[in-house]
Every structure is written in C-alpha cells, then in structure tokens.
Image (cartoon, rainbow, N blue to C red):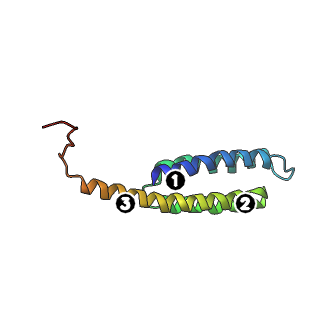
Amino acid sequence: MRTLCSSTLIGEFFVIGFAGLVAMKDPDLSMSTVWTVSGAAMALCVLLCGLITRPGGVQLGWALQIALIASGFVVPVMFFLGAVFAALWWASVHFGRKVDEAKARFAAQTAPGEASTGAGAS
C-alpha cells in the first residue's frame, strides 16, 4: 500500500505546486497566502509518504483529498483534478491493501529456511 499511496501523494505534490502558480494570478490573493497554503499542503504530501502505514495516515490522506477538491473554489480546475486524485487515492488504498494481503499470504506459504534448489541439483 505504501508504494501506491506514496506515488499518488507525489503526483499531488506537483499538482498542488502548479495550482499555486495558477492561484498567484488571482489579484485578490497575496503571494504569501498562496504559498503558505500551497507549501503546507505540499509538505503534508511528503510527510504522508512516511506516515501512510501508521495509524491515522490513510485518514489524513482523505483529509488532504477533501482539501484538494475544496481548492477548486480558488482554482476551478482543481474540482476536477481533486476528484481524479481522490479516485486515485481510493484505488491506491484499496488495491494496496490487497497487494499487502497477497504478499502476506505468499510469505506464510513459504516456510522459513526452505531454499529452492536449482535445476539439476541433487
């Protein structure tokens, strides 16, 4: 799950940065406000890459997805991109857990210390 979720988060990191560049064009927003919010969200993406397997990591990721969708009120295209990344987040969590379960089943089937022998070994 960690690899899939981290990949999604790194993609979001870049999208948030580009959305910050677009938001700078809004005359009602100060540059410091835009980069404080964007920077905090980008830092959260990187932080979550390390916290994803800890308790509350997935829930914090969902909070980030909601914030990304809500950023559409400032940069309208983020409604669409936020929904896309929310779907990717769901898929990363869902299929990541399935991969983790399959790895655990495979590890349980392979007895410790049991080495496979090569062809022709006697």
The answer to whether 46 appears left or right of 38 in the picture is: left
Residue at disc 3, secondary structure: helix
The answer to whether 28 appears left or right of 105 in the picture is: right
Q: Which residue is mark 1?
A: 5
Q: Are marks 3 and 1 in contact (CB under 8 Å)?
A: no
Q: Earlier in the sequence, mark 2 or mark 3?
A: 2
Q: Which residue is mark 2?
A: 80
Label 1 crowd bin: few (<14), some (14–19), many (20+), radius 10 Å? many
- Name the foreground residue: 29 vs 3: 3
The answer to whether 103 appears left or right of 15 in the picture is: left
Percent position of residue 111, x then y: 20, 52
Label 2 crowd bin: few (<14), some (14–19), many (20+), radius 10 Å? few
Residue at disc 1, secondary structure: helix
Q: Earlier in the sequence, mark 1 or mark 2?
A: 1
Q: Earlier in the sequence, mark 3 or mark 1?
A: 1
Residue at image coords 75%, 60%: 72
The kind of residue on which mark 1 rests is Cys
Identity of the residue furthest to the front in this view: 120
The kind of residue on which mark 2 rests is Phe
Residue at disc 2, secondary structure: helix
Q: Quadrant of the N terminus?
A: bottom left
The kind of residue on which mark 3 rests is Glu
Label 3 crowd bin: few (<14), some (14–19), many (20+), radius 10 Å? few
Q: Give the Cα distance between marks 2 and 3.
A: 32 Å
Task: Determine which quarter of the picture holds residue 73.
Answer: bottom right
Percent position of residue 12, x then y: 63, 50
Q: Give the Cα distance between marks 1 and 2.
A: 19 Å
Q: Which residue is mark 3?
A: 101
Percent position of residue 122, x then y: 12, 37
Q: Give the Cα distance between marks 3 and 1.
A: 16 Å
Residue at image coords 67%, 62%: 83
